[in-house]
Image: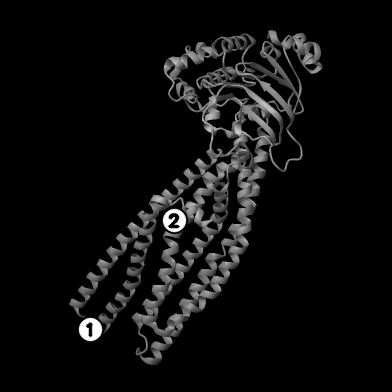
């Protein structure tokens, strides 16, 4: 896990090494200063010599300034190293997630991914900052302080050593109890973030159904669960400070008692007052280092679970890979499903799609009708290889989709998904997701085909109109038409509309389909729809039921021969849905 995380240090290795170097210099200076002070006090006690006092004073001032400078440099390099490490870690995670297949993304919930890239990375960053500075400073300070204490106090310095084993045992015991609690806490953080994200995204629905109180209660439960486990962990960690304080005062009391006895019994020949006073300073340095070390351990305990969750993302391998010798050209828009069976995971008991045999010629318009849960979307997701088939094969242009370079295939298969997503930015910036090099004329043409130009030109800023996050400032129908225009700019060989005209009126829907027929004759068009009017002029209509193809035919054929299709058609005609 440490090796995996260390790869994200990269260009910040120099800063990560310079910080401990300056910390070491700072610690050495801090340990020598009490020794010099003891010498100065001895000079004052035995022989007041202004020349010696000035020399010692200048030496102490110089060392104090050097200690200040090296401490500041250590802090600056530490901040640069930890912030840079966190930046690289987020970047590595983000890039990794971009390569995930839908199956990988299904494995991790969206709130969990957000928590890992924010809270977890921040915890690891703080831990790394402490490791680079405090985790280096504390042991060096303890070692040098003990050496200097031994030089000044002789065997009396071993009082400090006696307290270290029980403190180490107490720390180890606390960490053993705390780690499982933090493991639970971060899982509950995911649930808390999920509650927040769900509520914010669905705020309109929450208010429309007056469910604010219910959502508050749900949030309170999630927050309470986080609080309970976090309180238990913090309660255990809170023992660090009193244990350290007890050890500190015990050691100082022991040094004062034994030192006073030695001074009195030997008349200062074994140890004198300045040496005892500076021995107390070294004791303070040793035990304060131990206290800081306990803080580092506490932070590492908390960030250990965060680090594991981050590495879990970095270790995750996409379930979709380019073949060894990929095909970089899609010949045409023909699609063939040969004995296809599909389920979302290997452990799933039931197939989502079963026994799919389907052959679509390039340039055909195909309609897909079926009830909710009939796996219409799952079927078309296999064409652009968002998932791989479990059994059988899907071919595009006569070649198995698994033989194509993924980018090549997906650039030739444009999908307007059921959930239309627009990103914050101008209309032009959103359209250029389809083609980064598209000219203004090409964008206008695509918007005309998608029946979007007429409402865009009514905006004061036209194509430079700013779209809020998620397309919050445009209607559902406008959002759908912009997404269709974006897909058209790809100039694909296959265009898939997954219920993508449900929010537009039937007249606009008819104009969009007419534009497809006239301007995209060679593009294979696959239209998933709930309205019969959206697919009735298709070359073939596929009726899906429970993950199987129930029937294939033209509108006229299916009205006569297929009960499911006829029932849907009659319910819509009698209900007048096509005239609304």
State the count of labels: 2
Give the x, y percent position of residue 300. 52, 58
At mark 2, the secondary structure is: helix
Task: Answer whether residue 90 is visible to the viewer in this image.
Answer: yes
Camera-side mark, 1 or 2: 2
Quarter of the image with the N terminus in it: bottom right
Residue at 33% across, 74% down:
34
Graded by Cα atoms within 10 Å as few (under 14), some (14 to 19) or many (20 or more), the crowding at tag 2 reads: many
Q: Which residue is mark 2?
A: 129
Farthest residue to the left: give it.
Answer: 51
Give the x, y percent position of residue 369. 72, 19
Residue at 20% across, 80% down:
49
Q: Is residue 31 left or right of residue 258?
A: left
Q: Is residue 175 left or right of residue 437?
A: right
Task: Answer whether residue 385 is visible to the viewer in this image.
Answer: no
Give the x, y percent position of residue 537. 67, 10
Give the x, y percent position of residue 114. 55, 41
Q: Nearer the viewer, residue 276 or 367?
A: 367
Residue at 51% across, 73% down:
247
Q: Is residue 549 left or right of residue 319?
A: right
Q: Is residue 576 above or below residue 239?
A: above
**Residue 47's disc number:** 1
Q: Using the numbered discs, state the Cα–Cα distance from disc 1 to disc 2 in whole angstroms.
A: 47 Å
Q: Is residue 198 left or right of residue 460?
A: right
Q: Is residue 107 above or below residue 289?
A: above
Q: Nearer the viewer, residue 337 or 266?
A: 337
Quarter of the image with the C terminus in it: top right
At mark 1, the secondary structure is: loop
């Amino acid at each position: 896990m440490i090796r995996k995380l260390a790869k994200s240090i990269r260009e910040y290795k120099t800063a990560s090494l310079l910080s401990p170097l300056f910390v070491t210099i700072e610690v050495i200076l801090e340990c020598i200063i009490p020794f010099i002070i003891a010498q100065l006090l001895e000079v004052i006690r035995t022989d007041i010599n202004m020349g010696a006092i000035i020399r010692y004073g200048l030496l102490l001032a110089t060392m104090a300034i050097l200690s200040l400078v090296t401490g500041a440099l250590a802090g600056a390099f530490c901040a640069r190293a930890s912030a840079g490490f966190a930046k690289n870690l987020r970047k590595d995670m983000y890039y990794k997630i971009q390569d995930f297949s839908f199956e990988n993304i299904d494995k991790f919930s969206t709130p969990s991914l957000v928590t890992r890239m924010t809270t977890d990375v921040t915890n690891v960053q703080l831990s790394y900052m402490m490791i680079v500075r405090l985790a280096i400073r504390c042991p060096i300070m303890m070692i040098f302080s003990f050496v200097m204490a031994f030089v000044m106090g002789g065997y009396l310095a071993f009082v400090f050593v006696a307290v270290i084993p029980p403190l180490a045992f107490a720390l180890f015991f606390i960490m053993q109890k705390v780690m499982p609690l933090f493991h639970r806490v971060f899982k509950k953080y995911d649930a808390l973030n999920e509650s927040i994200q769900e509520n914010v995204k669905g705020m309109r629905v929450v208010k429309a159904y007056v469910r604010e109180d219910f959502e508050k209660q749900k949030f309170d439960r999630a927050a309470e669960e986080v609080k309970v486990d976090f309180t238990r962990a913090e309660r255990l960690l809170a023992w660090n400070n009193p244990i350290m304080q007890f050890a500190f005062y015990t050691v100082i009391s022991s040094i004062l008692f034994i030192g006073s006895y030695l001074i009195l019994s030997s008349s200062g020949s074994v140890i004198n007052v300045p040496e005892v006073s500076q021995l107390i300073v070294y004791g303070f340095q040793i035990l304060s280092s131990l206290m800081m070390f306990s803080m580092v351990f506490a932070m590492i305990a908390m960030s250990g679970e965060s680090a594991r969750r981050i590495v879990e993302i970095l270790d995750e391998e996409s379930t979709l890979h380019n073949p060894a010798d990929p095909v970089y050209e899609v010949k045409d828009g023909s699609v063939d499903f040969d004995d296809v069976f599909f389920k979302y995971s290997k452990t799933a008991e039931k197939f989502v799609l079963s026994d799919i045999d389907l052959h679509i010629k390039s340039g055909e318009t195909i309609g897909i009708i079926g009830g909710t849960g009939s796996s219409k979307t799952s079927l078309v997701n296999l064409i652009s290889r968002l998932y791989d088939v479990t059994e059988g094969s899907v071919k595009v242009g006569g070649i198995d989709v698994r033989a194509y370079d993924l980018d090549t295939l997906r650039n030739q298969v444009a999908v307007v998904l059921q959930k239309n997503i627009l990103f914050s930015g101008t209309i032009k910036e959103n359209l250029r997701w389809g083609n980064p090099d598209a000219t203004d004329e090409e964008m206008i043409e695509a918007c005309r085909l998608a029946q979007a130009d007429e409402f865009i030109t009514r905006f004061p800023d036209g194509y430079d109109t700013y779209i809020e996050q998620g397309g919050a400032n445009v209607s559902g129908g406008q959002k759908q038409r912009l997404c269709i225009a974006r897909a058209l700019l790809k100039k694909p060989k296959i265009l898939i509309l997954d219920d993508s005209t449900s929010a537009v009126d039937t007249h606009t829907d008819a104009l969009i389909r007419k534009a497809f027929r006239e301007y995209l004759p060679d593009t294979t068009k696959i239209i998933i729809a709930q309205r019969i009017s959206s697919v009735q002029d298709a070359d073939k209509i596929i009726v899906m039921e429970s993950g199987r193809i129930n029937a294939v035919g033209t509108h006229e054929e299916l009205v006569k021969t297929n009960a499911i299709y006829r029932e849907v058609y009659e319910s819509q005609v009698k209900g007048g849905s096509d005239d609304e």
